[in-house]
């Protein structure tokens, strides 16, 4: 049985030698008064616990929460979903799936214990949620690749199953936003498809067929759906849709040397003011795996920040090698946030967050005594 494909950046969280808790901030060189320091929330782990760290850029203060102690979130959780202020941590134990839902602003937590028990009839491949429902993607019945969605209403305990497609070849991560569940998969003929489920009526309102073009999906700040399609590592078509009506709002074409995978790229890309802010992947073998980059849809300029030099700068400062673990673009401050881990000794792995300007200047390095794994959308 599989539940969630762990992104490579989370491998540090499951190798069993992770990090203790507490934080401290180090002021770093090149602080520029006109640059606004970002406010951010990041989730991370050490060998005992899961943590939430809130940073106030205006006050230059951080606040640490031990989510294992406060909300009973085990560091071996399967996946984390975010819907507005609600974080949902899915976990699996003793043949059943459970979840902890935590409002990351107020700290209020709700426990959903053993909401689904595994059986030979269904093989669960992912979990997602809205504010009041859980969604499970699964194959059924035994041995088949018929792809279905189970919706569990947390208010009424009602459970509904809906077939998405018969005999699919592969499935990808879902994306939920504003009563729409976006489900990407590869059909029996190896064509990429995206089904849009209305989670209020539990009806499929449309299935897009992209053929051999790989669809990558994200939701912008206005709540519209962006689909980027391509069948090479450079040439892409971008289509902007109204998420509710699925009407086309705008289209564009662009070319960058970056391959986007099928399904959601919410954690890898943002489009703001005619610019694409994205996670650039370095060809392997390389000392680092990724770094920030921007593409200007007006000027067609593609700018890749020299992350190799930045990593070397941070390593010289902390006196240890670092491994990049998390990425985010902070729209309000127009900065990139890069999380990293550093191995102090065989039993202690700490980390930090680098704030980088759009131009590629290091603005701040904040040391953390745990490794960041996911930035939360504020």
Image (cartoon, rainbow, N blue to C red):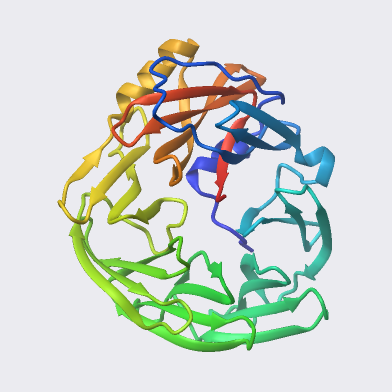
Q: Quadrant of residue 303?
A: top left
Residue 361: x and y in percent read 33, 26
Q: Position of residue 12 (x, y in %)?
A: 57, 35
Residue 84 is at least partly visible in this image = yes
The one of 75 and 204 positioned closer to us in this rendering? 204
Residue furthest to the front in view is 34
Q: 136 above or below 261?
A: below
Quadrant in which residue 262 is drawn: bottom left
Residue at x 45%, y 87% (from the top left corner): 206
Q: Position of residue 328 (x, y in %)?
A: 46, 43
Q: Residue at x 55, y 80 (%)?
A: 147
- So how many labels did they put on this image? 0
Please state which of residues 249 and 78 is positioned toward the viewer in this rendering.
Answer: 249
Q: Residue at x 70, y 49 (%)?
A: 77
Residue 345 vertical position relative to residue 141 in the rendered view, above or below: above
Looking at the image, is 118 positioned above or below residue 353? below
Q: Is residue 353 left or right of residue 362?
A: right
- Nearer to the camera, 298 or 92: 298
Residue drawn at 44 percent across, 84 percent down: 245
Residue 247 higher or lower than 27, as above or below: below
């Amino acid at each position: 049985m599989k539940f969630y494909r762990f992104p490579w950046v989370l491998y540090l969280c499951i190798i069993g030698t992770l990090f203790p808790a507490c934080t401290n901030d180090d002021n770093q060189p090149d602080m520029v008064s006109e640059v606004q320091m970002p406010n951010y929330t990041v989730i991370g782990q050490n060998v005992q616990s899961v943590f939430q760290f809130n940073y106030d850029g205006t006050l230059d203060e951080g606040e640490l929460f031990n989510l294992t102690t406060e909300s009973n979130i085990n560091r071996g959780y399967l996946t984390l979903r975010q819907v507005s202020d609600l974080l949902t941590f899915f976990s699996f134990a003793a043949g059943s799936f459970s979840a902890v839902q935590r409002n990351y602003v107020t700290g209020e937590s709700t426990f959903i214990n053993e909401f689904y028990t595994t059986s030979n009839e269904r093989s669960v491949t992912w979990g997602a949620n809205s504010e009041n429902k859980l969604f499970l993607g699964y194959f059924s019945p035994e041995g088949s690749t018929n792809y279905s969605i189970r919706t569990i209403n947390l208010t009424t305990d009602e459970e509904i199953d809906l077939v998405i497609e018969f005999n699919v070849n592969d499935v990808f991560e879902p994306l939920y936003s504003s009563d729409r569940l976006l489900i990407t998969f590869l059909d029996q003929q190896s064509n990429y498809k995206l089904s849009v489920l209305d989670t209020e009526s539990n009806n499929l309102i449309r299935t897009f067929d992209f053929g051999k073009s790989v669809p990558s999906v994200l939701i912008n700040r206005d709540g519209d759906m962006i689909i980027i399609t391509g069948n090479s590592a450079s040439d892409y078509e971008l289509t902007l849709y109204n998420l509710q009506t699925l009407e086309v709002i705008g289209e564009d074409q662009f070319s960058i040397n970056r391959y986007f995978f099928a399904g959601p790229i919410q954690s890898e890309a943002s489009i703001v003011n005619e610019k694409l802010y994205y996670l650039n992947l370095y060809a392997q073998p390389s000392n680092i795996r990724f770094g920030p980059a921007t593409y200007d849809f007006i000027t067609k300029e593609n700018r890749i920040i020299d992350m190799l030099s930045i990593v070397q700068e941070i390593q010289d400062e902390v006196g240890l090698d670092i491994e990049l673990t998390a990425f985010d673009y902070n729209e309000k401050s127009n900065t990139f946030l890069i999380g990293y881990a550093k191995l102090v000794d065989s039993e202690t792995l700490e980390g930090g967050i680098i704030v980088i300007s759009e131009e590629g200047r290091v603005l701040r390095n904040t040391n953390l005594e745990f490794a960041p794994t996911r930035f939360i959308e504020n």
